[in-house]
Image (spheres, helix red, strand yellow):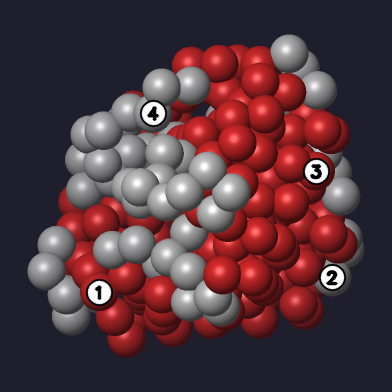
Amino acid sequence: MLARATTVGLVGLRRSGWHQVRHVHQRQFKSYEALRADFHEWLKKEVKLVSLFLATGLSVVFAYAYRDNSPVRQMQYILAEATAAAESGDKQRARQLTQRAYAIAGSVSDREPHLYELAFSIAAQYEAAGQFDLAKKFYHEAMTHAAYAKHAAKHVGMYRMVTLDRIAECCHNLGDVQGAATYYQRALDVYEKDRGTRELAKDQMDSEVCGIWFNYARLCMDSRQYTEGGQLLRKAAQCARENDLPDDKRAQIHELAAQLGAVPRPTFNALVGGGVDI
């Protein structure tokens, strides 16, 4: 739980966004704190799976006991180097090494379960660097691997929904309003189709979709589509209440609602009926 290249704000700053870092697993990876520091700007952004994917993408310990020259062992060595590069602040080298690991994983099998995490991690690093075209490329690649990712039986819908949201954010940053709207809608379509169809999926997807409604509302406001923006923001506000999201997330919705409320009358009253109930 959605990524811009500047300090997080709200609407009017195209590089703001729903900067929610959530956790779907209790397990923490060894280099998480170092990665959090090195990629602090990106980690402040939106998705629930952010910390998991970035940590996994750069420091995953594979549960295989292969020989030292095996592809999996090579990935271990390369990812260890990537982690060291990240810890030293060399983000470009960390990304390059992660891409090498990704290429090796792909040479093993196009269904290798770590391909999704690695592709997502590479995309997220490009997004943090403001290279949104390359970020889109790797998010699209992540989409092709989602069905074979770890825990896909339970979470593939959420993986796809989150990745589509990231593609939409990249489109928004690139000024592609129609593309962004298309991918936001696809993410919401996945939510409507898959929510509650797998064990534990409903609560996690219901919580995650709040950020997508929020980001989509920002896109609509940037495009002066105030009717749609108000409707989406109301859904985000309701979702935040029903899922007991943290106060800072509700504050973001409240601030965006206040900006929507600043639209000159009678436009605002006519379109959203006087405000959004947070």
Which circle, 2 or 3, is nearer the viewer?
3
On the image, the x and y values in percent for residue 140 come to: 67, 73
Q: Amino acid at mark 4?
A: Phe
Q: Is residue 78 above or below residue 172?
A: above
Q: Are marks 1 and 2 in contact (CB under 8 Å)?
A: no
Residue 189 falls in image quadrant = bottom left
Quarter containing the C terminus: top left
Residue 187 in view, yes or no:
no
Q: Secondary structure at mark 3?
A: helix
Label 2 neighbourhood size at 10 Å, few (<14), some (14-19), many (20+)?
A: few
- Disc 3 marks a residue whose amino acid type is Gln
Tell me which numbered mark, 2 or 4, is placed earlier along the sequence: 4
Label disc, if present, on residue 29 of the rendered structure = 4
Q: Which residue is mark 1?
A: 153
The residue that mark 2 highlights is 176
Camera-side residue: 13 or 168? 168
**Which residue in the protein does label 3 denote?**
96
Mark 3 or mark 2, which is nearer the start of the sequence?
A: 3
Residue 199 in view (yes/no) = yes
Crowd band around label 4 with a 10 angstrom C-alpha radius: few (<14), some (14–19), many (20+): some
User: How far is the residue under mark 1 from the one under mark 4?
Assistant: 22 Å
Amino acid beneath label 2: Asp
- Residue at x 42%, y 51% (from the top left corner): 66
Q: Earlier in the sequence, mark 1 or mark 3?
A: 3
Q: Are marks 2 and 4 in contact (CB under 8 Å)?
A: no
> Gap between marks 1 and 3, in whole Å?
30 Å
Gap between marks 2 and 4 measured at Cα = 36 Å
